[in-house]
Image (cartoon, rainbow, N blue to C red):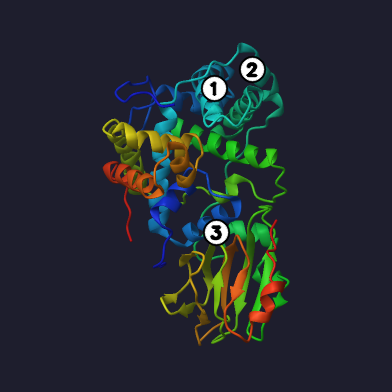
């Protein structure tokens, strides 16, 4: 069960539907693994519904009603076996959609001997949405962030100076947080990372790469 | 804009066992019989709310707001079969559709080329066990009741975040308040509404 969760303000913005698409998708993947946050999120949604109920209605013309009525014949009622659901255990549906397949179908780009990255297209022009594959025991070179970074563990786990993280754990790093995550020894780690600015390596060995690190958005 | 607390609306707030308020009944009739009269009643009540929701924060023009109303109401017609009165009030169900459609519309207007619809971001909750359903309904009821006790400064920010679609940071900038103040007001409101946060 996940031990690291999004802060309440993030969950609230998520429930209100206000997060940028890439971040909303990441929080959604956390909810897939976390029953507690699902519950909180559901209650935060009730709050939105209660506010909606209290809105002052804006007048709507009869012509709008008539044009909707005229279109009902074309709007075929949906049958209800196939709605997407939370699915703890399997790869979250939203990721499957973005990967158009499964983790095994992805194309990976090799960054270091232990790190590979696969970029997914969410359509969000401001955020990079990528899967990181770190070999068991492998380390991501120490880096800081020029912007915010959301990380979510999908498989395996990793640790840094602040703790160790496993499936479903959610982390939000702010600019200037420095860390060097290391995958657990026993298995490879796959995590989802959502960035609004490229990473910046701090160690001398990888610093030369910084000018070449670009954000793969969209 | 949000009404001052205390005013009640007909129909949508009855939570006694299996809910049988007017709007749930409309949805049931729409699903079972494609009942256009029920749909028309439902439209007359909810279309103005959906339009108000579209215009909150007002970056959408009136004609785009009308388009959103149409889109949401067509979805109501199509999805009525998925409405479960044991799970949510009709208005909660409509709000979900309206929120998702509004977000999708914003993204369309910004020409996002995305494989995702907002429905993918918010999949249906799985639990259908009677006890969980009952608890869920009680929570919805409690949130509605306790909302009347929130002070105006907290309501104002909740309205900005939920109805106007603002982030906490945008709400803070608009109200000329420190971000910390905005976040703590939201947090206080959430505590008063007894929303459960297990960590």
- In the picture, measured across the screen, residue B38 lies left or right of residue A198, that is left
Q: Label 1 belongs to which residue?
A: B47
Label for residue A8? Answer: none
| Mark 3 or 2: the one toward you | 3
Residue A140, position in %: x, y? 57, 80
What residue occupies the far front of the structure in this picture?
B176
Residue A18, position in %: x, y? 52, 45
Chain name for mark 1: B
Q: Mark 3 falls on what kind of element?
A: helix
Q: Residue at x 33, y 21 (%)?
A: B8
Please state which of residues A90 and B30 is positioned toward the viewer in this rendering.
Answer: A90
Chain name for mark 2: A
Chain name for mark 3: A
State yes or no: discs 1 and 2 in contact (Cβ < 8 Å). Answer: yes
Please state which of residues A55 and B136 is positioned toward the viewer in this rendering.
Answer: A55
Residue A51, position in %: x, y? 41, 32
Q: Label 3 belongs to which residue?
A: A26
State yes or no: discs 3 and 2 in contact (Cβ < 8 Å). Answer: no
A164 w.r.t. B138: above or below: below
Label for residue A64? Answer: 2
Q: Residue at x 47, y 37 (%)?
A: B174
User: How many C-alpha atoms fall within 10 Å of the one at disc 1: few (<14), some, or many (≥20)?
Assistant: many
Q: The C terminus of chain B lies in which quarter of the figure?
A: bottom left
Quadrant position of residue A74: top right
Give the alpha-carbon distance from disc 1 to disc 2, as whole Å: 9 Å
| Mark 3 or 1: the one toward you | 3
Q: How many circles with numbers are drawn on the protein?
A: 3
A215 w.r.t. B147: above or below: below
Q: The N terminus of chain B lies in which quarter of the figure?
A: top left
Residue A70, position in %: x, y? 69, 19
């Amino acid at each position: 069960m996940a031990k690291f969760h999004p802060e309440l303000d993030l969950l609230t913005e998520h429930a209100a539907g206000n997060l940028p698409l890439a971040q909303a998708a990441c929080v959604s993947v956390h909810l897939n693994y976390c029953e507690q946050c699902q519950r909180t999120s559901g209650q935060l949604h009730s709050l939105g519904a209660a506010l909606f109920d209290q809105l002052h209605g804006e007048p709507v013309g009869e012509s709008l009603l008539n044009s909707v009525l005229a279109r009902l014949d074309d709007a075929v009622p949906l049958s209800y076996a196939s709605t997407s659901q939370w699915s703890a255990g399997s790869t979250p549906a939203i990721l499957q959609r973005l990967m158009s397949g499964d983790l095994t179908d992805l194309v990976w780009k090799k960054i270091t001997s232990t790190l590979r990255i696969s970029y997914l297209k969410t359509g969000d022009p401001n955020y990079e949405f990528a899967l990181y594959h770190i070999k068991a025991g492998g380390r991501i070179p120490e880096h800081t962030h020029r912007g915010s970074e959301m990380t979510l563990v999908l498989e395996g786990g990793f640790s840094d100076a602040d703790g160790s993280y496993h499936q479903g754990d959610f982390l939000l790093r702010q600019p200037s947080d420095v860390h060097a995550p290391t995958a657990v020894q026993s298995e490879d780690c796959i995590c989802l990372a959502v960035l609004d600015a490229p990473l910046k390596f701090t160690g001398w060995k990888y610093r030369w790469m910084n000018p070449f690190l670009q954000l793969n958005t969209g | 804009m949000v009404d001052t607390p205390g005013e009640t609306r007909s129909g949508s707030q009855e939570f006694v066992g299996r809910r049988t308020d007017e709007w749930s009944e409309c949805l049931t009739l729409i699903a079972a019989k494609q009942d256009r009269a029920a749909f028309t009643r439902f439209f007359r009540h909810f279309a103005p709310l959906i339009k108000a929701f579209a215009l909150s924060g007002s970056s959408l023009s009136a004609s785009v707001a009308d388009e959103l109303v149409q889109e949401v109401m067509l979805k109501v017609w199509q999805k009525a079969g998925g409405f479960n009165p044991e799970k949510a009030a009709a208005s909660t169900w409509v709000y979900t559709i309206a929120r998702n459609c509004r977000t999708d519309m914003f993204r369309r207007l910004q020409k996002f080329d995305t494989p995702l619809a907002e429905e993918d971001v918010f999949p249906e909750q799985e639990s259908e066990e009677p006890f969980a359903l009952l608890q869920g309904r009680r929570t919805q009821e409690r949130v509605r009741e306790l909302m009347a006790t929130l002070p105006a400064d907290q309501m104002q920010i909740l309205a900005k975040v939920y109805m106007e679609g603002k982030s906490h940071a945008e709400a803070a900038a608009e109200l000329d308040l420190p971000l910390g103040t905005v976040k703590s007001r939201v947090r206080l409101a959430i505590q008063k509404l007894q929303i459960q946060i297990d960590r």
